[in-house]
Amino acid sequence: MPERYVSPLLALPSHDPAADFVRAELKFYGVDHSGLSYEARVFLNRPDASADTPQEEGVDGGYAGSFHIFGHGGCFGDVGHCDVPSGPRHPYDLRLSHPLIPDTKTLVITDPLRRLRAHSAESNFTITVVAHVYDLGELPLGRDQTEPLLFDSVSLLTYESPPPLSATSVAEAEQPTPAPT
Amino acid sequence: MQISDKAVIDNRGYQYSAGLHGLPGQYCRHGNPPGSDPLFLPWHRAYLYFFELALRDQVANAALAWWDWTSPASHAAGIPVAYAEAQAEGAPNPLFKAKVQPAAQQNGQPQETFRQPGDPNALPSAEQIRQIVSLRSFSDFTAQLEDVHNSVHGWTGGTMGIIPWAAYDPLFWAHHANIDRLWRIWQLRHPQNFPAAFLNRALPPFPLTVAQTLNMKTLGYDYASTKVTVPGTRA
């Protein structure tokens, strides 16, 4: 089971000291949430990290934070019930989106990345993710159980100037709305 | 008759409300996948609103309580005593556990809710929440708050720890009232920052749009930090 992931080497971002990043984040794309619930513990430059590695920050500890999946526990419908539709959507389909579309999870790592850059002699680093599955007792989970920690890719993004808006917030083109009265 | 005693098919009862979230209704909205609207906070506000109305149909002044899992008491003892004790006033405590209707069971299980809580110190901290509430962008705010919400579900474990049965646990409502309260605090601090793109989106099965969940005063409730009452002249 992929309860542990170690990335290929990533380049540490190089910024002009006069315009250093104000926010750094890891974006995990295509994260499956159809199965168990778990905490994904993220470590920087700790390819040896495992389920027993303490969540200690700092260069030696390498812990950068966690994201959390509240899982659907498998499929409880009939055959095909949990298959996410592919292809274009009918323009008159007003139903809400399929609940099992893989998610995007964002972990802010501004301080851990700064610490790593300040103390590392290397220009590259790794990301290690360790899944800690929550204690659900003896629940009768659904069929087609997926393994924890399935995702498509992970990106490191840094932002040089405030306000620190995420890529998704830019994309959704926020507009002002009336204040609650 | 208590709300928990009503027949499963009675839409005024606890089993009906609990069954809307996961099994068998499967209406809940979570996550922020690309191309989808971030409905987590509006959908759960509508859910709390209609559940509290159902409570008030039984007891006119009933109100949902919120569980502040950042509090020193929670970091010392975990689940609040009101929900953690199996017995209350010499009888089974209805906040400790609840039945799970047959339509939500798999091979006859689970028949009732249970918890497997973690280390109380692992609950979210007040500093975490302070940082999240300070986020200006709604998409950042809802994504980070939902992640903390996920962690509390997982920390509680058992039926609370997984979507199909989470809402059967009476603790679910106190957890989500706190999430809703934190959204209210964020709204007060960032009143102009809600995205307009999905205001007209419906929130099935509830007859509300996203826009109708934004103003809590039109829903008839708010979150008071404190309340002190003294007798008046007719007392």
Image (cartoon, coloured by chain):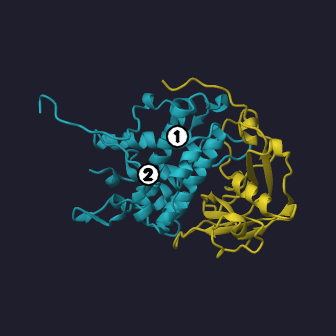
Chain colours: A yellow, B cyan
The C terminus of chain B sits in image quarter: top left
Q: Provide residue B154's location: percent of width, then percent of height.
A: 55, 62
Q: Earlier in the sequence, mark 1 or mark 2?
A: 2
Callout 1 amino acid: Trp
Q: Secondary structure at mark 1?
A: helix
The answer to which image quadrant residue B170 occupies is bottom left
Asked if one can make out residue A45 in the rendered structure from this viewpoint, the answer is yes
Q: Which residue is mark 1?
A: B183
Few, some or many residues within 10 Å of mark 2 (<14, 14–19, 20+): many
Q: Describe the element under mark 2 as helix, strand or loop.
A: loop
The percent coordinates of residue B227 (x first, y second) are 30, 39
- Residue A180 in the image, given as x and y percentages of width and height: 51, 26
Give the x, y percent position of residue A169. 71, 38
Callout 1–callout 2 Cβ contact below 8 Å:
no
The residue wearing badge 2 is B68
Q: For residue A42, say whether it is visible.
A: no
Disc 2 marks a residue whose amino acid type is Asp
A107 up-or-down from B116: above or below: above
Q: Badge 1 local density, few (<14 within 10 Å), some, or many (20+)?
A: many
Nearer to the camera, B190 or B30: B190
